[in-house]
């Protein structure tokens, strides 16, 4: 069973039900009883009533339901906006709302788009007006990271599966401003993508002047508790960055942003 994608659902209860099934399948030790022990406003009884549609998921319980379901910051925000719209609460300033499902310029994707990691760069290259209006420009934009043949194959893939579309004016643009993939989901494609962008970042240190790139690194010592707190902080900041990326107008250069926290030294673990 693949991880449920909340933006693919039109019924919130169905998403909750499928997410619980996913967690139980991928973690034999998971149970609603155990996971809700430290939650004040969520109990196994309440979850059962919600799944039976005898109780509604209310806004005051969204945060703890999100913890129970182990949602990402984006999924938590999406669920909060969804429940708010159902309760008739106006959306936050600067965001468009819906009577049922919140609108977003971001789509949570499966790892299918990463069958070749270059697909992400090709898709986003069409946000550049020069490339959108004249696709031939993409070979100059991405020539340093992929061959012409590979880029051509990527365009065919992205068009076939709806990641790219053609406007009435004949311009090619991404179907959605931003696609995000849960980095916690084990996937060989995600690992390949992460390795590729790390290699790109390494090369960029030599290829671009400091005024055209930004690099920062730090070394920290962590235990299990502080690691969890740090990853929660990074996840919150990543969510803010993704909101920022959703609203970007056409630029004139592709950038990649990496947030990476990795053990240094010690025993190797592969997952």
Image (cartoon, grey):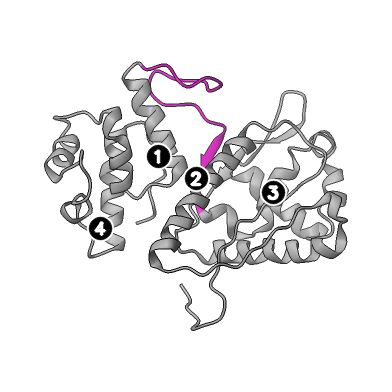
Q: Nearer the viewer, residue 194 or 42?
A: 42
Q: Mark 3 = which residue?
A: 156
* Side of 93 relative to 228 (left or right): right
* Label 4 vs label 3, nearer the camera: 4
Mark 4 is surrounded, within 10 Å at the Cα level, by few (under 14), some (14 to 19) or many (20 or more) other residues, namely some
* Label 4 vs label 2, nearer the camera: 2
Q: Is residue 175 visible?
A: no
* Spatial separation of the CA atoms under disc 4 and disc 1: 20 Å
Place of residue 125 in the rendered image (x, y in percent of width and height, measured from the top left): 75, 44
Q: Secondary structure at mark 4?
A: helix
* Spatial separation of the CA atoms under disc 1 and disc 3: 34 Å
* Spatial separation of the CA atoms under disc 4 and disc 3: 37 Å
Name the N-terminal-most of marks 4 and 1: 4
Q: Nearer the viewer, residue 165 or 5?
A: 5
Name the N-terminal-most of marks 4 and 2: 4
Q: Mark 1 = which residue?
A: 76
Q: Mark 4 = which residue?
A: 24
**Against 98, is 40 above or below?**
below
Q: Is residue 86 visible?
A: yes
* Side of 39 relative to 129 (left or right): left
Q: Nearer the viewer, residue 252 or 168?
A: 252
Q: Is residue 97 magenta?
A: yes
Name the N-terminal-most of marks 1 and 3: 1
Disc assigned to residue 236: 2
Mark 2 is surrounded, within 10 Å at the Cα level, by few (under 14), some (14 to 19) or many (20 or more) other residues, namely some
The residue located at (25%, 44%) in the rendering is 17
Mark 3 is surrounded, within 10 Å at the Cα level, by few (under 14), some (14 to 19) or many (20 or more) other residues, namely few
Place of residue 266 in the rendered image (x, y in percent of width and height, measured from the top left): 51, 83
Provide the residue span drawn in magenta: 89-110
The residue located at (17%, 31%) in the rendering is 53
* Spatial separation of the CA atoms under disc 2 and disc 3: 35 Å
């Amino acid at each position: 069973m693949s991880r449920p994608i909340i933006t693919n659902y039109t019924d919130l209860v169905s998403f909750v039900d499928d997410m619980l099934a996913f967690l139980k399948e991928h973690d034999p030790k998971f149970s609603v009883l155990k996971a809700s022990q430290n939650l004040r406003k969520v109990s196994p009884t309440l979850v059962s009533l919600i799944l039976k549609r005898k109780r509604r998921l209310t806004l005051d319980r969204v945060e703890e339901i999100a913890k129970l379901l182990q949602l990402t910051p984006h999924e938590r925000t999406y669920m909060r906006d969804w429940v708010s719209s159902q309760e008739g609460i106006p959306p936050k300033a600067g965001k468009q709302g819906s009577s049922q499902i919140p609108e977003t310029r971001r789509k949570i994707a499966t790892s299918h788009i990463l069958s070749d990691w270059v697909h992400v760069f090709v898709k986003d290259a069409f946000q550049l007006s020069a490339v959108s209006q004249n696709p031939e420009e993409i070979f100059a934009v991405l020539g340093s990271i992929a061959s012409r043949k590979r880029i051509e194959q990527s365009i065919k893939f992205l068009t076939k599966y709806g990641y790219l579309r053609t406007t009435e004016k004949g311009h090619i643009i991404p179907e959605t401003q931003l696609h995000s993939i849960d980095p916690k989901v084990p996937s060989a494609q995600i690992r390949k993508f992460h390795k590729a962008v790390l290699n790109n970042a390494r090369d960029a240190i030599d290829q671009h002047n400091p005024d055209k790139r930004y690099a920062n690194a730090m070394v920290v010592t962590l235990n299990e508790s502080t690691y969890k707190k740090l990853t929660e902080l990074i996840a919150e900041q990543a969510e803010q960055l993704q909101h920022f990326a959703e609203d970007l107008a056409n630029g004139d250069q592709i950038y990649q942003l990496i947030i990476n926290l990795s053990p240094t030294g010690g025993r190797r673990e592969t997952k």
